[in-house]
Structures are given as C-alpha cells and as structure tokens.
C-alpha cells in the first residue's frame, strides 16, 4: 500500500529563555494509506508537537516529513495551508466550534471556503452521517459535549480528507460518549478510507488502532500492532 505519511529522523526543539529544549529527537515512522494509527505517551512526551509536525502546522528543525506525497518541510506556510485544506482533517479535544454559528453552519464553513457548490446540503449529509441531522439549527452552547464533538467530526470530514488527525478526541467526554465518538471515527475511516491518526492518553483506545507508536521524553520507545477495531 502507498505511504500517506513518511517521517524520517525528525527533530524539534523550542527556546525556553536562554536554553534550547529538545522536544522530539530522531523520530522515524511510516503510515500507510487507510490505516488507523495511534501516538501514545505521558504528558510532555511530545505527542501534540509530533501531531502538529505531521499535519504541517509547524516545521521540524531537521529531518523529512512527506505527507500525501509532498515534502512539507520544503513548503512555505501558504503551500502547507493549501495542502491541509485539500487533504487533511482535524478533530481536537476542545471541539473548536464557532460559538456564533449553528451546527450546520460550522460544518458548512470549510466547504464554503473551498468554493464548494451546495455547501449547506453537503453539510447536512455529514451531520446525518454523525446522527445530528435533527440538531442542525442548534448552536454549540445548546449541544452536549458529545454532540459538539460529533459536529467537529462532521466538519473534519467536510473536505473528504485523505488523512485525519485527532488530538485527544475523547479527552473532554465521559466514557460512554467517548466510545460513541471513537466508533464514529473508526466507522468513517472504514467507509471513506480516510487514514486515522489519534493522539491519546487512553491505551484502550490506542489498542483499537492497527499500529501504536509510544513516545517518552521526545523519543520513540516502541512501535507495535494494536488489536484493531
């Protein structure tokens, strides 16, 4: 199968006062198209930093990141943004919905920005897929945490992404609601063939993915197979 993400010897540091703090060092792994993949590790191990690099939100200090066939370390900010808009989806722990827009409008906005025709009808189809067609006219404040995250999932799939990055997608949800959101992500992965990359503290969730990458102190301590969904 084709590699959708290829990370080779990536390192990333940040300045902390006068010191340089190494956050990631010598990170190498690959993800095949259509796979489910999780990144786990304790707080401060570099998980979210790695996710940001993989998705082209930031650049590494050194190493190579090839995302959807593009060497993103060689792209400028506008080019990386263009690649993300066309081929990448995101789901965050804190939902990141626009509070002044309805569920339908939150999902439709990315479609409208891409110049899609019938953005509203496509957004309704996506809300229907996540079981929220009857809540389309509700604002985020009128929705439960689980419903907000399902809207966020619908929005993440609005550009029919090749790869979706989920950063602690169940972190703000109770167990049952979190399981429902996870089931939704995996079902959409199967139905649409979207590669799924999850950053999580939840080892039970990680075990549902095909591959598990464990980080500690900014380095890879293991890569293993999960049980799969």
Image: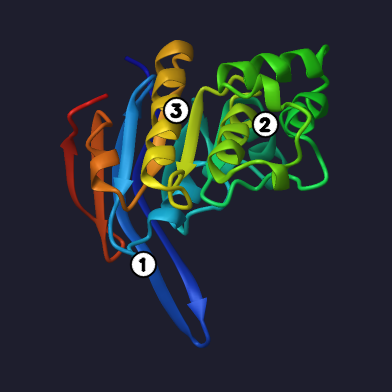
Q: Is mark 2 on a helix, strand or loop?
A: helix
Residue at the spot x=38%, y=19% of the render?
34
> Could you tell me if residue 203 is visible in this image?
yes
Task: Name above or below for residue 29 compared with residue 10.
Answer: above
Q: Nearer the viewer, residue 119 or 105?
A: 105
Identify residue for label 1: 44
Instruction: Give me the C-alpha separation between circle 2 and circle 1.
Output: 28 Å
Give the quarter of the image for residue 133: top right
Q: Mark 3 or mark 2, which is nearer the start of the sequence?
A: 2
Identify residue for label 2: 85
In the orientation shown, which residue stands out farthest toward the bottom? Answer: 18
Residue at the spot x=75%, y=45% of the render?
98
How far from the left and from the top, in percent, is residue 3? 37, 24
Instruction: Give me the C-alpha separation between circle 2 and circle 3.
Output: 19 Å
Residue at the spot x=80%, y=18% of the render?
120
Q: For label 1, count other residues whose C-alpha is less than 10 Å away and answer few (under 14), some (14-19) or many (20+).
A: few
Q: Is residue 10 left or right of residue 29?
A: right
> Could you tell me if residue 62 is visible in this image?
no
How far from the left and from the top, in percent, is residue 153? 56, 32
Q: Nearer the viewer, residue 46 or 156?
A: 156
Task: Name above or below for residue 79 compared with residue 61.
Answer: above
Q: What element carries label 1?
A: loop
Identify residue for label 3: 185
Residue at the spot x=17%, y=29% of the render?
227
Q: Nearer the viewer, mark 2 or mark 3?
A: 3
């Amino acid at each position: 199968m084709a590699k959708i993400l290829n990370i080779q010897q990536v390192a990333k540091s940040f300045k902390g006062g006068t010191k340089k703090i190494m956050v990631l060092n010598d990170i190498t792994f690959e993800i095949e198209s259509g796979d489910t993949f999780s990144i786990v590790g304790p707080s401060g191990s570099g998980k979210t930093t790695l996710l940001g690099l993989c998705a082209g939100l930031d650049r590494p200090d050194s190493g190579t990141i090839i995302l959807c066939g593009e060497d993103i370390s060689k792209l400028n900010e506008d080019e990386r943004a263009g690649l993300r808009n066309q081929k990448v989806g995101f789901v965050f722990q804190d939902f990141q919905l626009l509070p002044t827009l309805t569920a339908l409008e939150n999902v439709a906005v990315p479609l409208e920005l891409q110049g899609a025709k019938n953005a509203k009808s496509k957004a309704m189809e996506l809300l229907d897929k996540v079981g929220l067609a009857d809540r389309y006219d509700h604002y985020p404040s009128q929705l439960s945490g689980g419903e907000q995250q399902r809207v966020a999932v619908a929005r993440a799939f609005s550009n029919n992404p090749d790869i979706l990055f989920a950063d602690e997608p169940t972190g703000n949800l109770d167990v049952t609601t979190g399981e429902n959101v996870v089931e939704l992500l995996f079902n959409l992965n199967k139905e649409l063939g979207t590669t799924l990359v999850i950053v999580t503290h939840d080892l039970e969730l990680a075990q549902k993915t095909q591959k598990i990458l464990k980080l500690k102190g900014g380095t890879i301590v293991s890569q293993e197979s999960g049980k799969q969904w």
